Amino acid sequence: MSAPRQPLAWISWLRVVAIAGVVLVHVTGATASGPGSTTTVDGWVARALDLAFLWAVPVFVMLAGTVSLDPDRYRGDGHYLRRRALRLLPAIVVWNAVYVAYRASAEEGWWRGPRAALEDVLTGSVAPHLYFLWIVLGLSLLTPLLVPWVARASRTARVLAAAGLWMVPVLSTWPLGPDGEPVGLATVAWTWWLPYLGAYLMGEALHGVVLPRRWVAPAVAAVLGLTGLLVWQWQNPKAPAWLETWVGAHYYGPSVAVLCVLVLLLAQTTVRPGGALAVLAGPGVVRVVHPLATATMGIFALHFLVLMVGLDLGLLGEPVATWPVLLGRALVVGVVTTVLVLLLRRAPVVRQVL
C-alpha cells in the first residue's frame, strides 16, 4: 500500500470557496426569488450571487468522496465508522436541537409539539441546510462497502459508475412518469444521500486528473457559460419551458452536474505547483487557508443561525434588499460565523459538532 496522500491545497481552497457560495445562496435567496427578480438590478445581482453557486453543495459531497473513498487513507471499517459517528451523530442531534429551540422561541406558533418537531427534522423543514449532515451520514455508512471496490476498479469503471449513479437524480426530475410527471425521489433524512452517491464516487474517480493546458481555457469558458445560463433561466418567464423541464436550474440538473465536474477539475488543475494558480498552493498560503477549510462544516451549520438572528433583530435589514445590502450582509454573516466557529473549535467538546 502506498503512503497516504497529504492534504492538498486545491481541496482546502475549494472548500473555502464553496462555503462562501453557500453563505451567498442563503443571504441572497429571498431577493433572487422575490418580486423584481428578473426586472431590477438588485434582482439580477441576487440571482448572479445565488445561482452561480448551485455547484457548492454537490462539490462538498465530491470532496468528501475524494478523501473518504481513498483506499490509501482508509484505516479499516471500525476506525472509519467510529470516527464518522463521533463526528456526525452529535452534529446532527445538536444542530437540529439548536434550530428547533431557536425557531420555537423566536417564531410565534412554530412549536406544535415534539412529534411535529421531529417530523420537521426528518423532512428538512427546521432549516434548509441541515439535510447536508444527513447526506454525509448516509454516504459514510456506505463507504466501507465502496472502498474495496474503488481499490480494485479502474478509473474508467469508477467514472462510468459515478456518471451512471449521478444520472439517477437527473432522470428523476425529467417528465418520464405517467402523464409526463417527474418520477421523483423521496426527500427524507434516510434517503437524502441517494441523489448524491454519484457525486461522492465522482470526487474519488477524478482525483488526480489534471486537464491539459489547452483544455483549461475552454473549461473556464464552459463554467462561465453554464453559470450564465443558470442565472438567466431560473424562474425567468422569458426562458423556454423545455429548458427548465429538461435542464433545470437546481441541484439535480444535468448542467449543474457538468458544472460541478468542471469546477473540481479546474481546481485541481490550477491550484498546484506548476498550475495557473500555483501561488495559492504555496506552503505559507495553505497554512492560512487550511484552518478555514477544516472549519467549513461548522460554518455550514452555524451561518444560517447567524443570518436568522440578524434578520429577526433587524440588524441585517429586510430579507429582500438592495444588492449593496446583500453584499454587506454576506460579508457580516461570513465573518461573524467564521470567527465564532474558529473560537468555539478551541473547546474540545464543542469542536465535535463544528
Image: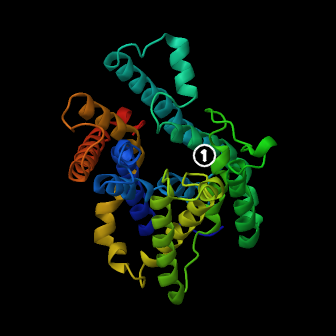
Quadrant of the image occupied by residue 122: top right
Q: Quadrant of residue 351?
A: top left
In the rendered image, the residue lying farthest to the left is: 315
* Disc 1 target residue: 80
58 lies above or below 224: above
Counting the numbered discs, the total is 1
Q: How is the image coloured?
A: rainbow
Amino acid under label 1? Tyr
* Residue 69 visible within the image: no
> In front here: 153 or 268?
268
| Looking at the image, residue 211 lies above or below residue 307 | below
* Mark 1 neighbour density, 10 Å: few (under 14) some (14–19) many (20 or more): some
**Which residue is at 57% across, 29% downward?**
123
In the picture, which quadrant includes the C terminus? top left
Nearer-the-camera pick, 51 or 330: 51
- Estimate the x, y position of residue 104 in percent, counting from the top left: 38, 17
Q: Is residue 163 left or right of residue 241?
A: right
Residue 48 appears at what percent x and percent y?
38, 59
Work out whether 114 lies above or below 47.
above
Work out which quarter of the rendered image holds the N terminus and state it. Answer: bottom right
For the point 44% across and 55% down, which residue is it? 51
Measuring from the top left, give residue 139's x and y in whole percent. Answer: 63, 45
Q: Is residue 96 left or right of residue 28?
A: right
Image spot of residue 53 (x, y percent): 44, 57
Residue at x 64%, y 57% (from the top left corner): 242
- Residue at 43 percent across and 13 percent down: it is 111
